[in-house]
Image (tube, helix red, strand yellow):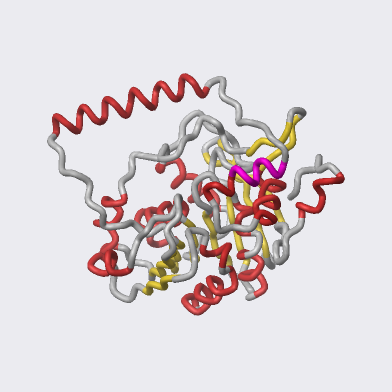
Amino acid sequence: MPSPLLLETERRFAEYPGAESPMRQRKVSSNGVGIAVSEWGDETAPPVLLAHGGFDFAATFSVFAPILARAGMRVVAFDQRGHGDSDHAKLYSWGADLRDTLAVLDSVSHAPIPIIGHSKGGSLLTQFAQAYPHRVSHLINIDGMPSRRRHPDVSNHERSKLLDKELVAWLDHRRRSAELVRKPGELEDLARRRGRMNPRLEHAWLCYLVTRGARRDTDGWRWKIDPSMRMGGFGPWSPNWELQRLPGLTPPLLGILAVIPEQLGWETRERDLRPYLPRGTEIISFEKSGHFVHIEFPQEVARSVLDFLS
């Protein structure tokens, strides 16, 4: 829902063509951490679970999710811990995100259902499908497929030194983050900042996202993202590990790839994936899209998803 503190001059940003607010919102407890859940569609319809990318939130599906809902689905999206309206936590990790995903799924259905993830959410749900294959009927990964770029094979001694360096950097960041607050700004300032990483997305869309994913404080707008998080801080994880595990994936897989390079894009190509894909996998490359495929081409991505599920 939009911030209740929108100024009169900002109200025009609270709407965007095709975007719809969730029909239901609630919180699920994941071992004491509150995970915000948004839903579109009839509560009795077949469910599908959506997971957003890193430093995003469920409202980034505000155009895409209603299309699936109108096709007869109960669309369930959640804010990952530290994002959006979910609780901030003392620590963040892939393992915690997997447990949060399971908590949300348990609140929806114990039968296998389709799951759709974008970017980090796509990688997260790919790991979820590997860990809990009996809970997943279909997996759709939107520009979160791993690449085959190889990391240098370093010796155990060098690995120890690299680990030591990483741990020191992480502890220093945690020490500094105890007093960190996100930089405030006017609504359009936050939209412009996000636009540096999302250069293909409309300014009007980015302003709309601010009304959903940020809050107005006395000194300006701030994104709700926990300031203690940093890019690449969800580890330990390597795209190469995930690539090696792909052949063992059992739920049917649809991989949607963005072709136009972007700062946050994964730059994965079908030719890189083919040797590792399970039998029956479908790959669709969007030649004219950047990383946020479901935002640039929501109708086309939804059609691909619905065709795959049918």
Nearest to the observer: residue 18 or residue 46: 18
Measured along the vertical axis of the image, is residue 201 above or below residue 286? above
Q: Where is residue 33 drawn, in percent x and y?
A: 56, 37
Residue at image point 51% right, 72% down: 305
Does the magenta run of residues contain 124? Answer: no
Q: Which is nearer the eye, 4 or 125? A: 4
Q: Whole-percent x and y of residue 60?
A: 61, 55
The image quadrant of residue 143 is: bottom left
Q: Is residue 182 left or right of residue 128?
A: right
- The image position of residue 232, as x and y in percent, is 41, 40
Residue 245 left/right relative to 77: left
* Dominant secondary-structure state across the stretch colored magenta: helix
Q: Which residues are magenta?
A: 187-193
Query: In this rendering, does residue 136 appear at all?
Result: no
Residue 164 visible to the viewer: yes
Image coordinates of residue 199 in percent, x first then y, are: 55, 54
